[in-house]
């Protein structure tokens, strides 16, 4: 059995590979069609003009689904590892809620492009990365008690994520403050001699760094998810779909996907 066939580790693996592919494929398409500059554009700029916009949107929508599934399985894992511990249970529920909100933000990014509804796109980015960073923080805190071996790895990723957010925030505020011109939101092509080019590059590098810090965090779930499975319990209320007596007559317990929880 290959490593990705063990338990549910294919979920975080698929999330990371698919999300990275959505950025890279849309970037390659946009560069080949000369819609953007090859040197470190904003991720959102790679999904602004058709046809890469269509590719970017549909792939990120699938990433949203994979993200929700991964967040849910992580929630169930922590729940199973710490029964009867109220503090961990509250943190776990908070983490689950934050993770779902972050995934919803990714869906907004996918469907509200930067050029069409800029403010909705920014809201999606804040939900994805801002709330997502808090999700990483919560999961790192949970790891301190439940998974000490992974705790320091997740701390490093959390620091990477936090520094990327800080760098992106400061450079973006400077860039869009009006010091370097107006209508920069619509700008896809930059000249290295232009005023504000260095700040723009710092901002774009920070965004790519932030995105890959998130993907790196979900990579830390792979080892955990190898020991998890989903099981379907089917209760029959009759011998046919038309026969529904008051009491259940049969139960069927089916292993849905590998391993155990």
Image: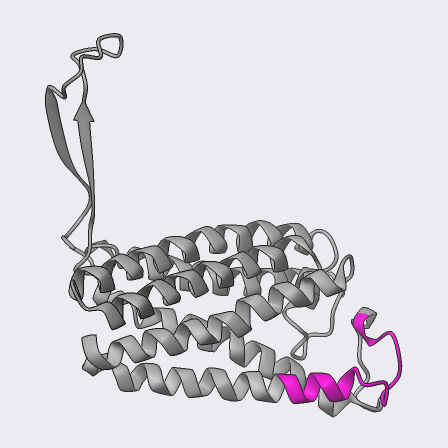
Q: Nearer the viewer, residue 45 or 37?
A: 45
Q: Position of residue 59 (x, y in %)?
A: 54, 53
**Relative to 79, is 58 on the left or the right?**
right
Along the horizontal axis of the image, is 107 left or right of 213? right
Residue extending furthest toward the top: 242
Residue 9, compared with residue 165, is above or below; it is above
Q: Position of residue 222 (x, y in %)?
A: 27, 66
Using the rendered image of the protein, determine whether residue 114 is visible from the camera's viewpoint: no
- Who is closer to the viewer here, 33 or 18? 18
What is the span of residues highlighted in magenta in the rendered image?
169-185
Give the left or right position of residue 18, taking residue 24 as reference. Answer: left
User: Does residue 170 belong to the magenta stretch?
Assistant: yes
Residue drawn 16% across the image and 60% down it = 227
Q: Using the rendered view, name the quadrant where residue 117 is placed.
A: bottom right
Can you say whether 234 is above or below 14 in the image?
above
Choose top left, top right, bottom left or bottom right for residue 79. bottom left
The C terminus is located in which quarter?
A: bottom left
Apparent side of residue 123 relative to residue 193 in the rendered image (left or right): left
Of residue 260 and residue 47, the one placed in the foreground of this image is: 260
């Amino acid at each position: 059995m290959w490593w990705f066939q063990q338990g549910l580790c294919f979920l975080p693996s698929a999330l990371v590979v698919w999300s990275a592919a959505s950025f890279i494929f849309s970037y390659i398409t946009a560069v080949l069609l000369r819609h953007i500059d090859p040197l470190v554009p904003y991720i959102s700029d790679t999904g602004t003009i058709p046809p890469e916009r269509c590719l970017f949107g549909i792939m990120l929508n699938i990433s949203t689904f994979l993200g929700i599934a991964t967040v849910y399985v992580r929630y169930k894992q922590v729940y199973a590892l710490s029964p009867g511990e109220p503090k961990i249970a509250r943190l776990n529920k908070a983490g689950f809620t934050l993770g779902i909100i972050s995934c919803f933000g990714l869906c907004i990014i996918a469907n509200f492009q930067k050029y069409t509804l800029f403010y909705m796109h920014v809201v999606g980015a804040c939900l994805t990365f801002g709330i997502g960073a808090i999700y990483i923080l919560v999961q790192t805190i949970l790891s301190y008690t439940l998974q000490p071996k992974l705790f320091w790895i997740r701390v490093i990723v959390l620091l990477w994520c936090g520094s990327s957010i800080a760098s992106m925030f400061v450079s973006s505020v400077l860039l869009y403050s009006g010091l370097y011109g107006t209508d920069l939101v619509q700008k896809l092509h930059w000249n290295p001699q232009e005023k504000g080019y260095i700040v723009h590059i710092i901002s774009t590098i920070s965004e790519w760094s932030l995105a890959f810090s998130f993907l790196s965090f979900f990579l830390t779930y792979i080892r955990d998810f190898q020991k998890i499975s989903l099981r379907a319990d089917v209760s029959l209320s009759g011998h046919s779909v038309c026969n529904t007596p008051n009491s259940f007559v049969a139960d069927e317990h089916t292993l849905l996907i590998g391993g155990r929880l």
